[in-house]
Amino acid sequence: MLLLKNGFVYDPASGLQAKRDILIQDGKIAEIAEPGELTEETADAYMETVQENGLTDLKVLNLEGCQIAPGLVDVHVHFRDPGFTHKEDIETGARAAAKGGFTTVVLMANTKPAVDNPETLQYVLEKGQQTGIHVESCGAITEGLKGERLTDMPALLQAGAVGFTDDGIPMLDEKLVKEAMKQAVALDVPLSFHEEDPKFIQNNGVNAGKASAYFGIGGSDRQAEISLVERDVKLAAETMAKVNIQHISTKEAVELVRQGKKKNPDICAEATPHHFSLTEEAVIEHGTLAKMNPPLREEADRLAIIEGLKDGTIDFIATDHAPHSAEEKAQDITKAPSGIIGLETALALGITNLVRTGELSMQELLAKMTCNPARFYQLEAGAIRKGAPADLVVFQEDEPFVVGDFASRSHNSPFTGQTLYGKVVYTLCKGKIVYS
C-alpha cells in the first residue's frame, strides 16, 4: 500500500486541479482526499478490510512541491523488437518510457517480421507484459507493410491489437485505404496514417527548402504530406472512420484536419514534441540527429502546429520515439536513417515550449498526453479517479535538468545538452514505482 501526500494533482479527464492525497492499494487508486484526511491510521483501517493476516508495511511519499498527473500515454512508439534490437528492444524501450513518465505505450507494426499476424503480435505483447508498464501494439494494415493486401484485421484485433497502421510507409492505393477504413468502422478501431507521398520526395528527412539547400540536396517537399492528408481526410469523412493523421508537420495539413473534423469529429491528428519545438534550422545545426520523417519544416508550420494544439485540431502529442544506433546516424545526411528518440524528453519539451511560454495550460498539455490518446485508442488509462489503475507520473514542473543520460539503448536526440523544465521524479504503474 502506498500513500502519496501533499502533491498537486492535475487530472484533465475530470478537470481536477488541486492539492490531494492519494491512497493506492492492490494496484488501484483506493481513495483521493484533501490533504490531511488520509492518515496512516486511515490507511491501516483500509488494509484491515482486505488483508487476512494483519497489517503490512505502508509506504508514504511526501510529494510537497511536486505535481501528480495520470501516467502519460504515447500512441506512436518504435521499440524495434523483433528485428532491430541493436537500436532498442521492448525492455529498454519500456525503461525509457518509465523515465519519461509514460505508463502506456502503443507500438508500431514496422518491425521485422512486421506485426501483420497474431503470432508476432503475441510475441510483442507477451514481452511487453514482462516490463513494468503497459505495452500495447498496433497491427499492420497491409500484409508485410507492402500496401497491396489488407491483413486479417479481425484476427489481429482478437489477438490484442489496439489499432492498425503501416507507419513508416505511406499507403498509396486509395481504394485499399478506403477498404481499410470501412473495415475499421465495422470493427470500431482506429487507423493511423503516415502521410508522405514519395513522388514529392528526393531525399527524405530534410525539408525541401533552406535545409535541403544547405546540404546541396533535393529534400522532402511539403506537398508530400499535404496530398495524402487531403485524400485521407476526404475518405475519413466519407466512411466516418476513426483516423489519426500521424506526426503532422505542415500548416496546410493542420488546416485540412481542422476542416475535416467538421464532417467527422473522429478525424484526429498527433503532433510530436520535435515538430512543435524545432524548425529546419535544427537540421542545419545538428545534421542527422535532427533528420526525421516527416522533416522539420518552417517557423510558420511550427506555429500552425501550436495553434492546432491550442484550438483542439491536434488531439494528442506523440513522440514517434525512433531509436537508431550512433553508427547509423554517423552516416552522410542522405544515408542516415530518419528519426529521433523522444520518450525521455516529451513532457519536458511540452512544459518548456508550450506551458512556460503561455501557449497551453498544464491541464491542456496533459490532456494531449493522457486522456485524449487513451480515449481514442479505448485504453484504460489517462485518468485519476477512485478505482482506476494507479498509473501516475510525479514531476516538478519548475525543476530544470540537462538532457542526457538516456535509459534508451539509442541516444539519437538533437536535445542532448539542452536545459529543459519538468523533471520526472517518480513514475508509478499498477501501483508500483517503476522509475524514481
Image (spheres, rainbow, N blue to C red):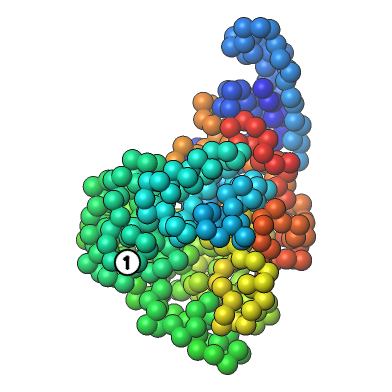
Residue 208 in picture, x, y percent from top left: 50, 85
Q: Say which residue appears at 73% left-offset and 41% top-offset.
A: 436
Q: Say which residue appears at 61% left-offset and 61% top-offset.
A: 87
Q: Residues within 10 Å of mark 1 (few under 14, many from 20)?
A: some
Name which quarter of the figure residue 262 lies in: bottom left
Q: Is residue 69 left or right of residue 141?
A: right
Is residue 109 visible to us here? yes
Q: Is residue 347 left or right of residue 225?
A: right
Q: Say which residue appears at 69% left-offset and 30% top-offset.
A: 4
Depicted 302 relative to depicted 210: above or below = above
Residue 276 in picture, x, y percent from top left: 56, 67
Q: Say which residue appears at 72% left-offset and 50% top-offset.
A: 423
Residue 64 in picture, x, y percent from top left: 76, 36
Q: Is residue 351 left or right of residue 301?
A: right
| Residue type, label 1 | Gly
Depicted 89 relative to depicted 337: above or below = above
Residue 333 in picture, x, y percent from top left: 60, 82
Element on which disc 1 rests: loop
Is residue 312 visible to us here? no
Nearest to the observer: residue 423 or residue 18: 423
Nearest to the observer: residue 284 or residue 87: 87
Residue denoted by label 1 = 147
Nearest to the observer: residue 363 or residue 412: 412
How many numbered dots are placed on residues in this image? 1
Quadrant holding the N terminus: top right
